[in-house]
Image (cartoon, rainbow, N blue to C red):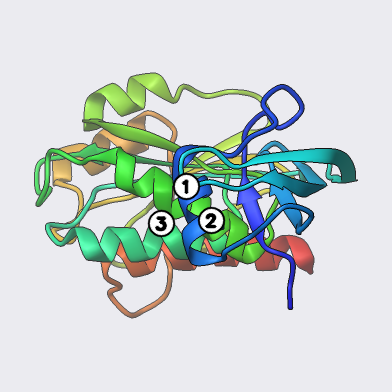
Amino acid sequence: MSIPVFYEPNPTASPFLSEEESIHAHRVLRLKAGDPIFILNGLGQKFEAKIEQSTSKKTTFHQLREIENSEKASYSIHLWIAPTKQMERMEWMVEKCAEFGIQSIGFFHSRYSERKEIKTHRLEKIVISALKQSKNLFLPQIYPIVPFKDLLKQIGPKEQEQRLFAYISEPPSLSLGKSIHLNHAYHILIGPEGDFSKEESELLLSSDWTPFSLGKAILRTETAGLAATHAIHLLHEK
């Protein structure tokens, strides 16, 4: 039987699981005193502990011991995306990007956006679940939706950062692999399924955002977000 994994942001200061995690430990896994567990704090540390007392309201643990402390990678991925009308598709993308490993996922609405509001609470639960399933040690940050122009003001040019946006053009832009510089922080902008408007594309280009192509096929918004995330990981593995 594999040792179950839980998320607790500060296990050294709070030797108990959240109510939601406690319900899972007590009612679903039926853990009892003495059972071993792993705890991830989402900041690069993994701990080993033993259940002290298990109830559906508050499950406590003791004998906490750090067993892994991972340094951050030499690069980071920050995905900014215009959410689709169907939230199930966004939830799927968020889950898969978190499994691959990503630093943050944020949302914006632009001229052709299908959705201008988004509830982040459920997405935060999804990334916690993906963190535990994938055994990644860093929890992605989820940012609420903002207007397109506000986002551009928020993400100004910085050293060792690249700002790139998926761009459908003729002739096509350079591929993502030919556009990025290795070991940077990447802000990846994915527009709505109606794409960026002409004015928005021109604003991005004049603001020194780098256009890139994900190939000849026209990808769905959530597919493009996942493809860009995975491509950057693969480029760094090479």
- Residue drawn at (12%, 39%), measured in percent from left and top? 116
- Crowdedness of circle 3 by 10 Å Cα count: few (<14), some, many (20+)? many
Among the two numbered marks 2 and 1 on one chain, the one whose residue lies closer to the N terminus: 2
Vertical position of residue 6 compared to residue 91: above or below:
above
What amino acid is at disc 3?
Val
- Label 1: few (<14), some (14–19) or many (≥20) C-alpha neighbours in 10 Å: some
Q: Which mark is residue 26?
A: 2
> Where in the figure is residue 87, as x and y percent of width and height?
20, 58
Q: Secondary structure at mark 3?
A: helix
| Count of numbered tags | 3
Labels 2 and 1 touching (C-beta < 8 A)? yes
What's the residue at 25%, 38% (across, down)?
108
Q: Earlier in the sequence, mark 1 or mark 3?
A: 1
Q: Is residue 196 visible?
A: yes
Q: Position of residue 69 (x, y in %)?
A: 86, 42
- Residue 193 falls in which quadrant of the image? bottom left
Q: CA distance from mark 1 to mark 3?
A: 28 Å
Q: For the residue labelled by badge 2, is the local secondary structure a helix, a strand or a loop?
A: helix
